[in-house]
Amino acid sequence: MRILFVTQYYFPETGAPQNRLAGLAIELKKKGVEVEVLTAMPNYPRMEIFEPYKGKFSFSETVNDIKVYRAWIFTSKNRSIFARLLNYFSFVLSSFIVSFKVKGKFDFVLCESPPLFLGISAWFISKRKKARFIFNVSDLWPESAEKLGLVTNAFFLKLAYKLEAWLYRKSSLVSGQTQGICKDINTRFPGVKTHWLPNGIDPGRFNEGIDSFWRAENHFNKSDFILLYAGIIGHAQGLEIILLAAEKLKGEKDIKFVLLGDGPEKEKLLKMTAELQLSNVFYFNSIDSTQMPAIVKAIDAAIIPLKKLDLFKGAIPSKIFENLAMEKPILLGVEGEAKDLFIEQGRCGLFFIPENADDLTDKILMLKNNRALALELGVNGRKYVNQYFNREKIASDFYSVLSDLLN
């Protein structure tokens, strides 16, 4: 079996699709699948091409014994919709051109969305490679962009929805990162075959024997109660709630908030932090994913928020998994599927009402003042993700679906 991943995002970038696809590729390869990847020059989230990829239109390398083909992409720190579209469409074009360097036929071409537009290039590549087309949906775009107010042009939205429908209908399989995504697609397009392909964890990366000096190296005290948000600092997360909670907890000198990552909302949050004179909030830039286990081990709990939108009731933020794998309880501000799985079923943390700083503040104090509860929730979380969100199991289930499609 041969499969080509077509994705704008891939290792050594950090992020949910990067980690998920790299992990899936490794697990499929263990099963004898020949996996190759066609991706962009690494640049995310700082929108600047990494060294040593600068100045190249195409580049080939082997990463974890997997052949990776990289194509040029337009990058800009300008956050306008025009710059974003140039970023997307530049890779649509360059990925198709560089695909001619990928030799031989494939059984499957799997396209990662968003960006939705990459499906155009990936579908044509699948036709040329005589492969079945798989469209992998990690975010219901353009619906999410419309609901968040990121795209408001009615004509453009109409075209995007038409493209979305066309790609679903052209797919042999549409995989979704959450059950909510799959249900949404099946409701709107009953004839489309879907498969739940969740994020997950590699238990071997997150073990109790990891040494961590991060707390001491960054001048936190042993007695500090450290709350971590790690991930994209974007529009969907509504991270202002963390700063509002930090303001309410100024009097609790041993409670510290750490925001680790980059993204379009970071400058806004830095300005808000200064205006509120928050000395209990600390910012760190994005890091390599290999460093995350040591950082997660050093903190006490993770905050995982999203804005209060019906759209996010089917969302499962990927940052849930690495925190639970390290036995850290989560403070989850996400309604719907994530709450059902990780709060109600797994008992892995405490729920707070999205965009409600008072409720988040109460839950922080509950965890801080009841360390036995925090420990219990963390232990529950590790057991839960190891049992239900193990990447090896996820890949095995996906491999069975692919085998059925071939047969």
Image: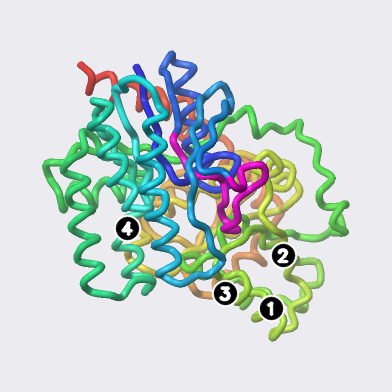
Cβ atoms at labels 4 and 2 below 8 Å apart:
no
**SS label for mark 1:** helix
Q: Is residue 164 above or below residue 97?
A: below
In the rendered view, tell whether residue 215 sits above or below residue 363. above
Check if residue 170 falls in the magenta segment: no
From the viewer's perspective, is 3 left or right of 286? left
Residue that mark 3 sits on: 240
The majority secondary structure of the magenta stretch comes to: loop
Residue 369 on image: x %, y %:
71, 62
Q: Amino acid at mark 2?
A: Tyr
Side of 3 relative to 189 (left or right)? right
Q: Are marks 4 and 1 in contact (CB under 8 Å)?
A: no
Q: Is residue 333 left or right of residue 102?
A: right
Q: Tell me which residue sits at (37%, 37%) in the image.
A: 197
Q: Earlier in the sequence, mark 4 or mark 1?
A: 4
The residue identified by callout 1 is 273
Horizontal and vertical percent for residue 359? Answer: 54, 72
Q: Residues within 10 Å of mark 2 (few under 14, many from 20)?
A: some
Q: State the residue at coordinates (68%, 32%).
A: 207
Q: Label 4: which residue?
A: 141
Which callout, 4 or 2, points to the residue nearer the camera?
A: 4
Q: Is the residue under label 1 in contact with that under label 2 (CB below 8 Å)?
A: yes
* Other-residue count near label 4 (Cα within 10 Å), few / some / many at <14 / 14–19 / ≥20: some
Q: Which residues are magenta?
A: 38-55
Amino acid type assigned to the residue bearing label 1 in the image: Thr
**Callout 4: helix, strand or loop?**
loop
Of the two numbered discs 4 and 2 on the same chain, state the one appearing first in sequence: 4
Q: Position of residue 143 (x, y in %)?
A: 29, 63
